[in-house]
Image (cartoon, grey):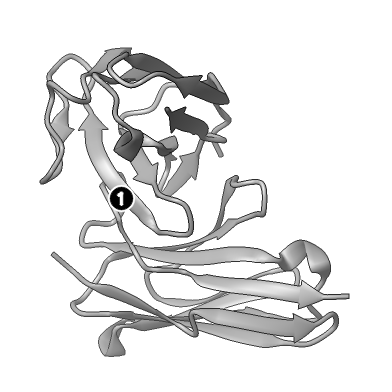
Amino acid sequence: GIQVEQSPPDLILQEGANSTLRCNFSDSVNNLQWFHQNPWGQLINLFYIPSGTKQNGRLSATTVATERYSLLYISSSQTTDSGVYFCAGGTNFGNEKLTFGTGTRLTIIP
Amino acid sequence: SAVISQKPSRDICQRGTSLTIQCQVDSQVTMMFWYRQQPGQSLTLIATANQGSEATYESGFVIDKFPISRPNLTFSTLTVSNMSPEDSSIYLCSAYTGYREFFGPGTRLTVL
């Protein structure tokens, strides 16, 4: 199966800062999703982005499928952005099991 | 999106006992999954809950230990059987709506 690596493993930033999280895949994926797990453990689906760029408020994501990586951008960080960010990939176009990365733990300091 | 609820939200159990976790989705879905997440770790898939047939288990997980039911398109249960302290973890169910996977709030299990 595919391997998913995320970097950096930990990130500590001041409120208002911008950040870039990276996800690398060992093989081609047709299903790529980003999740945020808040400090209470709830996983929120941020993006389904097998290719291209999407934006949702202060968050945006870009996937370069041919180079097997995806980036998650967080602008003007707020304390509510704290938590763990996971990317996950699969080889179909949805409705399938995903392989999750190890996550990036983001801490936003007021 | 899908709204997913789980019961119980947390439990403390004695070793050797079993616990059944319920997962309810607010709409009919094709694919439902069960995951385990150890503290500070990523998610590990336990099995795919198939409606109308036996669940599909991942390597390292067996039906005798983690029996799963999927009686309809909105509901599934996971039982953790003959528990040991190593089963202490967060158990999460998920479902797809469209191309996206959504998660329940999780069940925090502590085995003494």
Please name the amino acid that badge 1 sits on.
Thr
- Residue B65 placement, left or right of B12: left
Residue appearing at x 26%, y 15% in the figure = B69
- Residue at 21%, 76% in the rendered image: A28
**The residue tagged with tag 1: helix, strand or loop?**
strand
Q: As drawn, is B74 to the left or to the right of B1?
A: left
Neighbours of disc 1 within 10 Å: few (<14), some (14-19), many (20+): some
Q: Toward the viewer: A74 or A100?
A: A100
Q: Residue A32: horizontal and vertical position, in percent?
A: 37, 65
Q: Is residue B97 above or below residue B29?
A: below
In the foreground, B8 or B84: B84
Q: Give the image quarter of residue A100.
A: bottom left
Residue beneath the point at 43% across and 67% down: A87
Q: Is residue B74 visible?
A: no
Residue A14 place in picture, x, y as percent: 81, 84
Percent x, y of residue A16: 85, 83
Determine which residue is flagged by label 1.
B44
